[in-house]
Image (tube, rainbow, N blue to C red):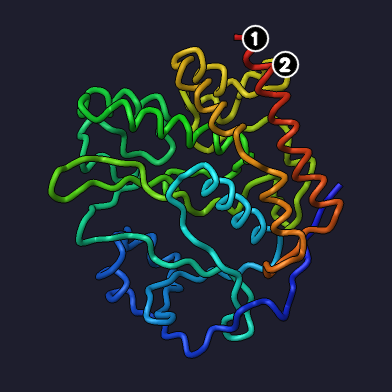
Amino acid sequence: MQYRIHFNQRKIKKLMNPFKMTQQNVLFYVDIDPELLAEKDSWYYVDGKVSFFKHREDVRVAGECISQAYAAALGEDVAKYSVVRLHETIGLLSENFQQKSKYRYFDFCQLHQLFSSFPRRYNCFTLKSLLQTLEYYIPENYQPLQQSLINRYVFDWFTHQLDGNPRNSNFRQDRITGKLEIDHVFDKEQSFGVSPNGFFDEERLEIWIPSIPYDSTEFRDNPFKFEGLDANLFALISDYPDMTVKAFEHIFSLPCSEILETFMGGETAFSLPKETLNYLVGIANRKEYEKEKILQLV
């Protein structure tokens, strides 16, 4: 079965006199690969702020906003999204969260600039190789990064993120101290079983297969089902039991029902029909069941 959302047209903010930025101007404010910028060339000055707009008129809006609300409730730094109308087109607007004067920014594909042994090929990244690389190069700052990365990985599983590709995981390095941190949560629109035709789809909630596997890249194509569960979580908790259990506890502290109720038709620009709300609540319940099976089987 497929589920949709409803837009509250009168509550969608219309952008007044947005000014489209040139790529050169964007690069002054945003640390982004020029090739990636060429694909995502929709940056604007809005109310004096550098902001990114993406055209979205389906459940991806809910996937993004609810994921961000979940992450914010966990105390994570998050990109802030709002539903807007730009030249009669509905979409999501997010302010630039980078501070280029204070930090340098890297996604997975750029980490080889910091760590020479880290792979450069797009399809070779694994969470395990990243953790091992960080432990080798920066042992003094490794442990907080280790827990943050495991938390984010379990968060992607909990929200059933289907597009956690290497470009969507960023790090920031303090320009003075050199300290490396995981950066904001962003670009989580393909969560909760979002389908290509713009619905939440129960059939997309089969076994979770992350874009970045934990261990062998074979996990991506052949996840080796364990009683209907993905091998990545088993491998992760086998190697890092205490930190993975801590991540589970962190994630399942979320007040999911309270967060979802804020989207029920009150002040937001979209609302969730009752059947969609029940579907999303059901995902949280399903993940609770999966977590218990994982803990029993390891």
Residue, disc 2: 227
Image-quadrant location for residue 180: top left
Task: Give the residue at x 24% y 61%.
Answer: 100
* Image quarter hosting the C terminus: top right
**Alpha carbon separation for disc pair 1 and 2:** 9 Å
- Tag 2 secondary structure: loop
Image-quadrant location for residue 139: top left
Task: Give the residue at x 76% y 42%.
Answer: 281
Mark 1 and mark 2 in contact? Answer it, CB < 8 Å. yes
Task: Give the residue at x 73% y 24%.
Answer: 289
Residue 26 percent across, percent down from the top left: 32, 72
Q: In the image, is residue 103 above or below residue 153? A: below
Residue 248 percent across, percent down from the top left: 56, 26
Residue type beneath disc 1: Leu
Image-quadrant location for residue 147: top left
- Tag 1 secondary structure: helix
Residue, disc 1: 297
Q: In the image, is residue 250 above or below residue 83? A: above
